[in-house]
Image (spheres, rainbow, N blue to C red):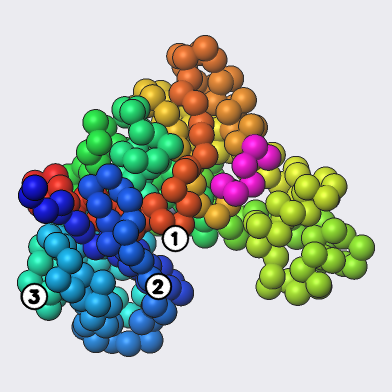
Amino acid sequence: MPEEPLAIGVDIGGTAIKLGRVRPSGEIVAQFETPSPVAQPQEEAVREVARAIARLADGRGVRAVGIGCAGLVDSARGIVHLSPNLPRWRDAPIKEWLSRELSLPVTVLNDANAFALAEAQVGAGRGHSPVVGITLGTGVGGAIVENGRLWGGRYGFSGEVGHISLELDGPPCPCGNRGCLELYVGRRALVSAYLDRAGWEPGRIAFDLAAGERQALEPRLLYDAANRGDHIAREVFARAGIVLGVALANLTNLLDPEVFVVGGGVAQAGDLLLEPARRTLAERAMMGASRVPPVIPAALGMSAGLIGAALQALRGPAG
Ligand SMILES: [Zn+2]
């Protein structure tokens, strides 16, 4: 029997690098995490990533390596131009460096692309096409997958769902536009929307849950507060859900997807966020409420990025 090809998938995050040895079915057969080399110069950091990959790949039928990384990634050339997770990386040719270190083919994807590919092929969107995957976290990312393949656009920069502009004269966004979705549903937006309305004083459920530590106020904690009856926290998610729903209606009018798969830390709020999004989508999409695509939570959790990177790597450079 021919040996099954395996790939190493790598998800380069701001605090940890997650690595997994992955089968073509998306199953992870071995995995580990290592702290992100945020402080090292980029070439040294890439060598450290290479050593971690080599540890996991060593003599085990690994044919390729896939890297998922947040930021501006040119996947055609395998260059990470900018990454919020690795501020010292600038135009890092990580495909070239890693393939030289490892003597294996390397593919590089934006993390949202890796997430969407995994969810479309082996996760919540399996069997559907096109799938639009959306990650809600500190940033808001997205990608379009058609028949199991990423729709990358000319440079692989497509799917920037977080920078769909929803307000002509809205607040300025670092991307150069104004009123972008990320400014309303990203982690920071939710926290500041809550603080603007609720203040930060003892007696508030969120304040008590965070033991008064303002730094600890995260969407996860707001979600807990909402479930314990903090009505301002509930309203913050409901409002963000409406804004998300407007963006989903725009995407539906443009792409007519079969399903939206929503993941990332902020999406853990579940129906508190997604129900208002679904309602708004149904009200606003041109095709009418009976035909709008379902909006479903992601299924692969924190492993989606590394699985998607590995699946892309197994497909090879032509994929
Ligand atoms: Zn923007």
Asked whether 269 falls inside the magenta stretch, the response is: yes
Given residues 20 and 233, the one toward you in this image is: 20
Q: Is residue 96 above or below residue 182?
A: below
How far across and how far down the image is residue 249, in percent? 48, 27
**Dominant SS in magenta:** helix
- Type of residue at label 2? Glu
The reply to whether residue 163 is visible in this rendering is no
How far across and how far down the image is residue 113, in percent? 32, 49
Q: Is mark 2 on a helix, strand or loop?
A: strand
Residue at 27% x, 56% y: name it: 22
Kindly identify which residue carries mark 1.
174
**Dot in front, 1 or 2:** 2
The tag on residue 152 is none
Q: Is mark 3 on a helix, strand or loop?
A: helix
Q: Decide if residue 301 is on the left or right side of residue 215.
A: left
Task: Report crowding for label 2: few under 14, some 14 to 19, many 20 or more residues within 10 A (C-alpha).
Answer: some
Query: Which of the two discs, 1 and 2, labels the residue nearer the N terminus?
Result: 2
Asked whether 188 falls inside the magenta stretch, the response is: no
How far across and how far down the image is residue 260, in percent? 44, 33
Q: Residue 56 lies in what quarter of the image?
A: bottom left
**Dot in front, 3 or 2:** 2
From mark 3 to mark 2, how far is it between C-alphas?
23 Å
Q: Where the C terminus falls, by quadrant?
A: top left
Residue at 71% x, 59% y: name it: 221
- Type of residue at label 3? Arg
Kindly identify which residue carries mark 3.
100
Q: What's drawn in magenta, residue-wise? A: 267-272
**Dot in front, 3 or 1:** 3
